């Protein structure tokens, strides 16, 4: 029997793996340990609008990494225009404007790791 500590999306789990008798290695039922504190990441520089953020939120639909900023603060966008492109599972996924507006702020940088639902930008 072997014990391992595994970190998934910042959550730390302790798991035990034991060898099966005749079918090879078989994972034992996973017991979720109390989450341990993950190391805090240093805040990255984030480009912002000079004024307050807009009232319309543009959020990530999936976890991934920011691949490209398709707009910049002050750009006018139409509903369906790509605002930010994220990369998830080797696919480029455009995150589009939910309505017509002007980009008020970009809340991420290229290369940032993001979770589903993360705020990427705001529109006015």
Image (spheres, rainbow, N blue to C red):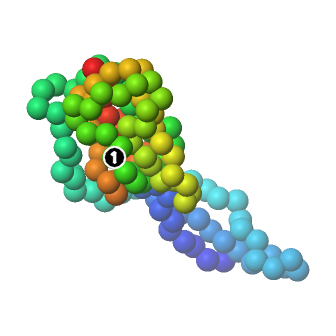
Look at the image and tell me whether residue 118 can be seen: no
Left or right of 29: which side holds 11? left
20 w.r.t. 113: above or below = below
Farthest right residue in view: 22
Residue 55, image x, y percentages: 29, 19
Q: Nearer the viewer, residue 70 or 95?
A: 70
Q: Quarter-wise, where is residue 98 in the image?
A: top left
Residue 53, image x, y percentages: 22, 26
Q: Nearer the viewer, residue 51 or 18?
A: 51
Q: Where, quadrant-wise, is the C terminus in this rendering?
A: top left
Q: Secondary structure at mark 1?
A: strand
Write the residue at 16% across / 25% down.
52
Per the image, the residue denoted by label 1 is: 69
Left or right of 87: which side holds 113? left
Write the residue at 22% across / 53% down.
44
Write the residue at 66% across / 77% down.
1
Write the residue at 47% across / 62% down.
7
15 w.r.t. 124: above or below = below
């Amino acid at each position: 029997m072997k014990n391992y500590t595994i970190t998934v999306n910042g959550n730390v789990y302790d798991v035990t793996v034991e060898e099966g008798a005749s079918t090879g290695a078989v994972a034992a039922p996973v017991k979720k340990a109390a989450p341990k504190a993950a190391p805090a990441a240093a805040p990255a520089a984030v480009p912002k609008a000079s004024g307050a953020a807009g009232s319309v939120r543009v959020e990530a639909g999936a976890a991934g990494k920011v691949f490209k900023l398709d707009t910049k603060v002050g750009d006018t966008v139409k509903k369906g225009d790509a605002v930010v492109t994220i990369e998830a599972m080797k696919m480029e996924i455009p995150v589009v404007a939910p309505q017509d507006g002007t980009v008020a702020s970009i809340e991420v940088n290229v290369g940032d790791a993001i979770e589903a639902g993360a705020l990427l930008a705001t529109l006015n």
